[in-house]
Amino acid sequence: MVSSRALALLAVLAPLAAAGSALAQDFTVGTTGLQRDMLLTDYSPLSSNLEMLRRFASPFDARTALQDLARSGKRMAEQPVTLEEERFTVYIPTNMPPDGYGLLVFVSPSDQPGLPQGWAEALDRFGVIFVSAARSGNRQNTRTRREPLALLAAENLRRLYKVDPHHIWVGGFSGGSQVAMLLALGYPDLFHGALLDAGSDEIGSAERPLPPRQLFQQFQESSRLIYVTGADDAINLALDRSSRRSMQDWCVFALDTETTPWQGHQVIGAASLSQALEQLSMPVDPDWDRLLACRSTIEAELNTQFDRVAALLVRHQSDRAREVLSDIDRRFGGLAAPRSLEILGP
């Protein structure tokens, strides 16, 4: 039986026509300061529908979506968005650091993003480019718009400007912060950290599955997450605590937290942004003993669950074995593949 998650993936990943080619570039390279309604033109394999399915969906859901797509007779579009129809807000700082600009891709909760008040000074100080897509607010579809637009923004700006590849980060506010966390989790080879402003979630679930093993190990080893939430934003402070516990349970330890005094649910100011950029600029130095011990604990749990499946199959309880495999897929995601897929069969 096809899961509702797989049906949702199929619905958003199987348009009938591929995205069209972009028009002539309309971006003033070399101009510093704020530029609004900019047109970016270059697509990237990282933002393709197939690659996002591989990184964002659990192995079972990805396979089911592709199988259902094949049966439907439809074809998957190469890209989920048409760049000629999209616009971006970009801020280029006045000075470029010796190793190149930093780059902060910001996911706004609003469809009309702007540069938050006071941020220009901090971006200038650290030499960080800011880019945020229009029509990428909380009402837009995460998979078909918010995530690919952020990926395409990063790819275009790092092609247009000299950008330090170790200083590319993703961030967001509120619902945009939750999307930023997913992007950091799925694309640690692009984003080396995330600014999570008043929005976060637990990972290792049906809604937020772990990416393929190699990517998740890179996330554990090299990604820094900055949680910043107002002291009066009780709901998101509680969500932050749950998210940090979840990260630590999954061996993600480069976590920094700031609670801004006398602030509710509102975007951070220049001082907090400066502190976050300074923290993000610091390379992650893993405690390898702690990390390897934590990974061993997870592997032991995963192997125990696979042993349960094997025992059920020996007793010819295939339906129950499939249920346990589904639980494994939801919890461990890409860490369980390809073994989980091999046991499940075609």
Image: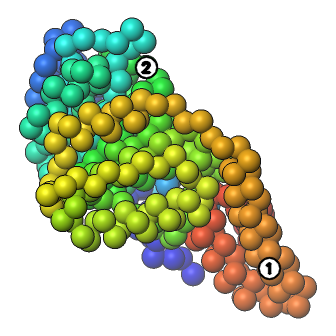
Query: Where 4 falls versus 132 (above or below)?
Result: below
Location of residue 270 by image quarter: top left
Q: Position of residue 11 (x, y in %)?
A: 39, 63
| Residue that carries the numbered disc 2 in the rendered image | 164
Local crowd size for mark 2, using a 10 Å CA cut-off: few (<14), some (14–19), many (≥20): some
Q: Which residue is most to the right?
A: 314
**Residue 250 appears in the figure:** yes
Q: Position of residue 252 (x, y in %)?
A: 56, 52
Front label number (1 vs 2): 2
**Residue at x-position 22% and y-position 52%:** 260
**Residue 80 appears in the figure:** no
**Residue at x-position 23% and y-position 26%:** 123
Q: What distance separates the C-alpha of mark 1 from that of mark 2?
A: 46 Å
Location of residue 174 by image quarter: bottom left
Q: Position of residue 19 (x, y in %)?
A: 33, 39
| Residue that carries the numbered disc 1 in the rendered image | 309
